[in-house]
């Protein structure tokens, strides 16, 4: 390092001498060749300065003390911090042997350089600076050349007080982190409790974790998963954990509103924009939700034409009512949900790829219930308690009934489980629900008569008729709708096959949890 600096100084002196020679009466015929040499020297010097890192200067700014000896223990370098704590000058060290310094000056106890020189190994020790009684942590490091021969022994001294302070700061940071984690966990749990959410499976826990992390940001979230897996409830969770809880949260089911009405519902319209338009126009849902949050549910069912308009709104963050040129700036947090495979829809030309990427900033995928078996037990008990309370019943489940519920594949996911529990509590009165009842209600075993409730548990005559007829119709409708959707692949096609309006089918699906 210092050799390099010496050469640098030498070159600078040469350049200065050349400049001086050229200014004086130097023979003109040599002038040109001198100029060329000076130019080369100056270019080389510039390059050297650019590439050269002045380690000596850097070391002099370190707060730790550094001492370097050659392989024989002759001191070749000490930095400023070393001089500061020893209270001596550079000349008192450089060129002197470490053994000599140790004997004469008694700077500190437990010096490690002699041990590094003799063992050629790294050494660590705690020493005391004699003059100040300051405790130091000393590390001795051997440095070897390419042949593996010892080249330098370096001592690096750290002030233990500083290390202690660092340790305290680290401990404080750790305890602060632990208490924020505990607080976060507490808030998360409270939020789960408020929403009555079950989250035992790793899959769902991960979804909740992501939702929790991004809730307080305004980032757009795309929630995907089969029908009934809890997409809407995750959207509720995000909204309730966000900073927008004092502002509106609007949920729009894009498949339930006929395509021709959805545009005016979303964006509103100006007075006179079409026949039948309200006087004074009507604000759209985006405008109403301004400052708050919108859930675009079943986004995969939105028409391509409307997708283009929605994309514009999301990109520009502004909306125009239909028939108006007045710009309405928007500050709405967008959550979108779908049970469709949007990648497939894009490949089939039914969903805009650019809209997909705009919505899919943070994806949250909810696995089907059959892949979240750890949640089933708690969900079953939660719903049992809920419906016992609602219908004033005392139904309970036998262990084999619980096992049967675990074994089922739950194509309708949590909504199906919830509905099944409601049905079983209603029809079973106050008795125990066993495995065969479960299988019968699930339609996975031949129908056998349900066990009769005890006479004291019997509801009034009117209730029996009403309850049984309503439940039978519901059960029949549920079955037909499920089969139609499975056969025709979409709710729209199923509706036309069943001879009902799409919106009627959607309402029934929502009511029955399909
Ligand atoms: N983890 C959970 N804990 C308790 N209840 C849940 C949980 N997840 C979902 N539910 C309940 O299951 C039902 C269906 O959930 P949700 O409506 O959120 O599903 P979804 O995926 O949005 O369905 P769809 O795609 O049909 O709209 C709701 O009644 C919801 O409260």
Image (cartoon, helix red, strand yellow):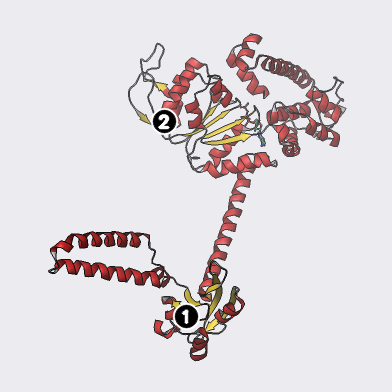
| Viewer can see residue 287 | no
Relative image position of residue 401 (x, y in whole percent) = 83, 33
- As drawn, the residue found furthest toward the front would be 29
The local secondary structure at tag 2 comes to helix
Q: Is residue 42 left or right of residue 346?
A: left
Q: Secondary structure at mark 1?
A: strand
Marks 1 and 2, Cα distance to the nearest angstrom?
Answer: 67 Å
Q: Which of the 4 image quarters holds residue 324?
A: top left
Residue name at image x 45 percent, y 78 percent: 76
**Residue drawn at the location 12% of the way across and 69% of the way down:** 25
- Nearest the viewer among 254 and 342 is 342
Q: As rendered, which of 58 and 380 lies closer to the eye?
A: 58
**Does residue 509 lie above or below 8 as drawn?**
above
The residue beneath circle 2 is: 315
Comparing labels 1 and 2, the label whose residue is closer to the camera: 1
- Residue with the most extreme bottom position: 104
Sequence order check: which comes first, mark 1 or mark 2? 1
* Residue at 48% from the left image edge and 31% from the top image edge: 358
Q: Foreground residue, 78 or 236?
A: 78
Q: Position of residue 372 (x, y in %)?
A: 71, 36
In the picture, the quarter occupied by the C terminus is: top right
Q: Nearer the viewer, residue 19 or 32?
A: 32
Establish if 194 lies above or below 124.
Answer: above
**Dot 2, how many residues are within 10 Å of its Cα: few (below 14), some (14-19), or many (20+)?**
few
- Residue 75 has which mark? 1
């Amino acid at each position: 390092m210092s050799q390099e600096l010496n050469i640098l100084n030498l070159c600078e002196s040469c350049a200065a001498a050349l400049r001086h020679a050229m200014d004086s009466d130097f023979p003109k015929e040599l002038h040109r060749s001198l100029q060329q040499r000076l130019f080369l020297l100056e270019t080389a010097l510039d390059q050297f300065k650019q590439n050269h890192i002045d380690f000596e200067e850097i070391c002099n700014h370190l707060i730790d003390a550094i001492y370097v000896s050659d392989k024989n223990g002759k001191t070749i370098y000490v930095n400023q911090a070393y001089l500061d704590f020893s209270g001596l000058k550079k000349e008192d060290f450089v060129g002197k042997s470490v053994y000599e310094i140790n004997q004469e000056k008694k700077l500190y106890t437990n010096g490690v350089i002699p041990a590094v020189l003799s063992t050629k190994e790294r050494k660590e020790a705690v020493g005391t600076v004699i003059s100040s009684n300051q405790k130091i942590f000393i590390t001795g490091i051997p440095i070897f050349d390419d042949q593996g021969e010892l080249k330098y022994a370096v001592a690096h001294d750290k002030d233990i007080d500083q290390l202690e302070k660092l340790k305290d700061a680290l401990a404080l940071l750790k305890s602060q982190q632990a208490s924020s984690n505990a607080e976060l966990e507490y808030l998360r749990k409270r939020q789960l409790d408020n929403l009555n959410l079950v989250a035992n499976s790793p899959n769902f826990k991960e979804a909740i974790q992501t939702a929790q992390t991004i809730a307080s940001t305004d980032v757009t979230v795309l929630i995907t998963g089969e029908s009934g897996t809890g997409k809407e409830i995750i959207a509720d969770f995000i909204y309730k954990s966000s900073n927008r809880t004092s502002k509106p949260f609007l949920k729009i089911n894009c498949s339930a509103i006929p395509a021709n009405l959805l545009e005016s519902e979303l964006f509103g319209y100006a007075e006179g924009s079409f026949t039948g338009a309200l006087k004074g126009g009507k604000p759209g849902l985006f405008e109403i939700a301004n400052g708050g949050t919108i859930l675009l549910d079943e986004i995969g069912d939105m028409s391509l034409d409307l997708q283009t308009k929605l994309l514009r709104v999301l990109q520009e963050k502004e909306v125009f009512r239909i028939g108006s040129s007045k710009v309405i700036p928007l500050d709405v947090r967008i959550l979108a949900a779908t049970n469709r495979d949007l990648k497939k829809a894009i490949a089939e030309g039914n969903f805009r790829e650019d809209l997909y990427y705009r919505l899919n900033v943070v994806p949250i995928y909810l696995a089907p219930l059959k892949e979240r078996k750890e949640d089933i037990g708690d969900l079953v008990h939660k719903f049992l308690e809920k419906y016992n309370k609602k219908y004033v019943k005392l139904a309970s489940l036998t262990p084999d009934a619980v096992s049967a519920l675990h074994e089922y594949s739950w194509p309708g996911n949590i909504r199906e489980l919830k509905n099944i529990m409601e049905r079983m509590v209603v029809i079973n009165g106050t008795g125990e629900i066993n495995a065969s009842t479960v299988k019968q209600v699930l339609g996975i075993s031949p129908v056998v008569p349900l066990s009769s409730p005890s006479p004291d548990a019997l509801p009034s005559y009117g209730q029996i008729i009403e309850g049984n007829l309503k439940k039978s119709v519901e059960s029949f409708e549920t079955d037909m709708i499920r089969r139609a959707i499975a056969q025709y692949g979409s709710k729209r096609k199923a509706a036309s096959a069943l001879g009902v309006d799409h919106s009627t089918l959607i309402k029934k699906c929502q009511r029955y949890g399909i």
